[in-house]
Image: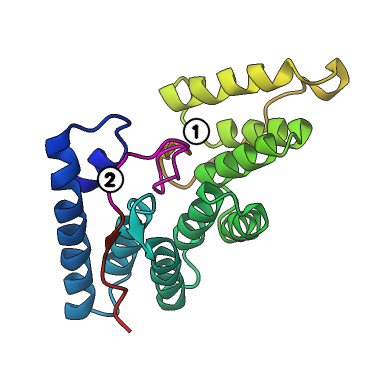
Amino acid sequence: LAHALSGKKNLSDAEKQTLPRLAQLAIVEARNAVLLYRTNVVNWDNLGRTYAGLTNFAAGSENWAIQSFEQRLILDPLNPQARLALGAFYLSLRQQDNAQNLIRQAIALKQDYANAHYYLAALLNSEKKYKDAYKELQITVAFLPPDSEDSKKVVSEMNEIAKLLPESDIGGEIPQGKSEEPQQLEPVSSSSGAIQSNPPSVPTISVPEPPR
């Protein structure tokens, strides 16, 4: 609920008063889960995502989200999802180099990771590297179920990028891939508590740091 409210542009006075309390409660609950089971990667991931969702108004939450995601990486270094989670958060902070490094690491660990290719395409598109972004979307759609809503979404985005490219850079058959399991895309804009250009007007609050 705290994350949902933090994403609203226009908060009522009641919501402005409620949000800090809910944010602190969310952090305390996530921290307690970690304290009870420090080696559980899901708990660290949940703590990281909780901090990430509060970066607009919770002092220190940006760095503590990174620390929590890094602790998950320490516990589960070969999990591509752990690397993508931190890479996606860096992308929301517009730290392009850190984001790209981790997203590419995720792809290296799992070549058919559609969501990682999708994030890489978004990053390259934001840097106006349209040809490379287009290729990453081609790879993304190859690992998605045919005729799925996600596949249609990616094709639509490919068509938009194609308008910015010369004809020589467009076309060719979509690479044929086969994923080990069904995959769904996680929207880039909302996956990691991306920082808003117009965050809600609420007082900055203090939340406890991650357990050490």
Which residue type carries mark 2? Val
Q: In x, y percent, where is residue 123?
A: 63, 42
**Magenta stretch encompasses residue 190:** yes
Q: In x, y percent, where is residue 95?
A: 61, 54
Relative height, residue 199 to residue 54 (above, below): above
Q: In x, y percent, where is residue 79?
A: 46, 65
Quarter in which the C terminus is drawn: bottom left
Nearest to viewer (mark 1 / mark 2): 2
Q: Is residue 50 left or right of residue 20?
A: right
The circle on residue 144 is 1
Which residue type carries mark 1? Leu
In this view, the residue farthest toward the bottom is 212
Quarter in which the N terminus is drawn: top left
Q: Is residue 1 left or right of residue 189?
A: left
Query: Is label 2 in a helix, a strand or a loop?
Result: loop
C-alpha span from label 1 to label 2: 40 Å
For image coordinates 21% across by 47% down, the residue present is 2
Q: Which of 22/163 is in front?
A: 22
Q: Residues within 10 Å of mark 2 (few under 14, many from 20)?
A: some
Magenta stretch, residue numbers: 189-203
Q: In x, y percent, where is residue 20?
A: 20, 53
